[in-house]
Amino acid sequence: MNKSLPDKWVRKAVYNAINNIQVGGYLIPCYDMKVVMDAQKDDPQHYILMTTQTNDVDKRNKCEWFYESSILLDFVTSYSGAGNPGSRLLADNIVDTARNALQSLTLDAGSGLEIVTQTMNFPADLGADSGAEVIFRKFIRLELRIK
């Protein structure tokens, strides 16, 4: 296949679409795989991670091969404190805002790649309570057919 791998172009497009979205009075940062710590600021409590990416080459088209590409977005909200602080509502609202922002995703023209179709799936939520912190995680799997 004589096309560049779409990973970096997909991450760039996703980041540009959802980094620092405003939800419920919070600015929600987006990170690549892990949270970047800033010594001058507190660790973020609500954020988005761009995690696992996959690419399969679809050879069914005789004229041109396509990539079947996907990226998993991990939406994290955490609340410190004993008891039952926070709720899943902010995580729900962050996912919904990001979903809307991703609707018309396009890849940088310099990539030489184009999104043909786009599908979103929403895997099961996760929740954890350590006694000192409650964490809610939601996911979007963005699937792209790229030529």
Image (cartoon, rainbow, N blue to C red):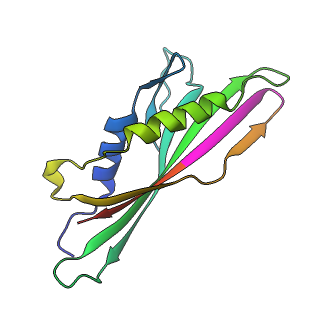
Q: Quadrant of the N terminus?
A: bottom left
Is residue 59 in view from this perspective?
A: yes
- Count of residue discs: 0
Task: Please state if 23 lies on the left or on the right of 56 as rendered.
Answer: right
Name the residue: 29% across, 84% down: 60
Give the x, y percent position of residue 29: 45, 29
User: Taken as a whole, is the magenta stretch helix, strand or loop?
Assistant: strand
Answer whether residue 14 is magenta in the image: no
Q: Up-down: is 26 above or below 109? A: above
Task: Tell me where residue 89 sits by quadrant.
Answer: top right
Q: Nearer the viewer, residue 47 or 143?
A: 143
Task: Please state if 144 lies on the left or on the right of 110 as rendered.
Answer: right
Task: Please state if 121 lies on the left or on the right of 103 as rendered.
Answer: right
Q: Up-down: is 105 above or below 16? A: below
Q: Up-down: is 91 above or below 24? A: below
Is residue 35 in view from this perspective?
A: no
Give the x, y percent position of residue 68: 36, 68
Name the residue: 20% across, 85% down: 62
Name the residue: 66% across, 52% down: 124
Answer whether residue 137 is magenta in the image: yes
Task: Tell me where residue 135 sits by quadrant.
Answer: top right
Give the x, y percent position of residue 125: 67, 47
Task: Please state if 137 lies on the left or on the right of 1 as rendered.
Answer: right
Image: magenta residue range: 131-139
